[in-house]
Amino acid sequence: MAKSGANGSDRPPRRTPGGLPNLHVSIAVASGKQFANRHYDDAVFNAFKAVEDRVKKLTERPEIGKRLMTLVLNENSPSLDVTSHNSDADQKGDEREGFKFLFMGALLGLRNPRGHGGHLATSQDEATEMLGLASMLMRMLDRAEERLALAAFDTDDKDENDEDEELGALDLIAVAEEAMPQLNATIEEMATCLAEIGPISSAGTPKINAAASMAARLVAVKAVADELLVPTQKFRELSTEYVAQLTDLNGGMDALIHLKPFADMAIDEQAQYLVLAESIRGLRDASAAGLAAATSLSQDFKQTAQLSRHLKKPAGELREGVRQMASVQHFYNEWVDAFDEAGRWDPPLRLSSPVAQTIPRRCWVYPRASPGRLALAAG
């Protein structure tokens, strides 16, 4: 009787190009030759390049890398649904968020380092495991492609009543309004973290200078570094939340901007729309100022960190947080440019205009000043 294969069947594992068992055929074709020739870094790079190329083909989007994955696997409005067939609503929510970061991380952590810079000397075992991950991602894309085909078929037979379920302008604006306070709260916490860094450094400097010996100075430096690690690490964690929140908001914002011509909107829709548009512009300008100030603080801190290895960890946390902030700054610019191109500020909104008078006063309060506070905290 034949022995059971690794896949649980009575067949032996299927061999694919390069001698790798049970890999998705696309990964085997992309990487098999390099793997067989022991060019393991090239094999890993080609595998995840094949994953990226397939995502681009399925979605017909021009973006690449991390930005591509954040857009098409956005958990609120994914272009590709890679979730399990039998998962419930809660499970799908977890899967969508997790798989988004899995695809992003695979390109950032496994593909990109092998496309830029020196040879990483990846071992055969490591490469095998990495190709297994690429194969799993490809099988997820199989699932997404099946769903795209079914969706296209269903669209042809779509009942006209289904159109009533689509979100309108006010629905999308409400989603954006709900997201804004969450984004604002994150920015406020980031500002608090930055504001704590200066006092800690200032309080620690006299202690370091007063130390009687070099060994004592190093002890004092380590104590300051440990204290600085708390706000800088928190800042980096909040920056990750900030990136996720802006990325989630981007899908709805893009749909809102291009929903329908401004002239075709009802007056209450126009009013809410104009307030949102203007608040985005103000948030963009303030966020740019906050990022510039945080970047300056990070650069100054980087020079200070050269004094001791103990300071490099908090300096690295701060630098990574700033890098993450910068990675999503383009969203603000894209939103503002899209509003401008659509003529959303023509004519400009006036508080005394009939349109403006329909807006509840609470709707004028958007988180415009918080990034400015971020700039003050860093400055």
Image (cartoon, rainbow, N blue to C red):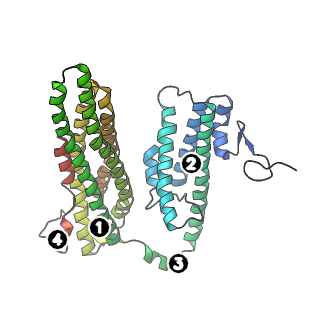
Task: For label 1, count other residues whose C-alpha is less than 10 Å away and answer few (under 14), some (14-19) or many (20+).
Answer: some
Task: For label 2, count other residues whose C-alpha is less than 10 Å away and answer few (under 14), some (14-19) or many (20+).
Answer: some
* Label 2 vs label 3, nearer the camera: 2
The residue that disc 2 covers is 54
State the CA–CA distance, disc 2 to disc 1.
Answer: 36 Å
State the CA–CA distance, disc 4 to disc 1.
Answer: 22 Å
Type of the residue with mark 1? Phe
**Residue 108 x %, y %:** 47, 40
* Label 4 vs label 1, nearer the camera: 4
Residue 364: quadrant of the picture: bottom left
* Label 2 vs label 4, nearer the camera: 4
| Position above or below: 235 against 172 | above
* Label 3 vs label 4, nearer the camera: 4
Lower position in the chain sequence, tag 2 or tag 3: 2
Residue lying at the far right of the rendered structure? 1
Q: Which mark is residue 361?
A: 4
Type of the residue with mark 2? Arg
The residue that disc 1 covers is 262
In the rendered structure, the answer to whether residue 27 lies left or right of residue 108 reads right
The residue drawn where x is 51% and y is 32% is: 114
Q: Which mark is residue 159?
A: 3
In the rendered structure, the answer to whether residue 251 lies left or right of residue 343 reads right
Q: Element under label 2? A: helix
**Residue 361 x %, y %:** 16, 71
State the CA–CA distance, disc 1 to disc 3.
Answer: 27 Å
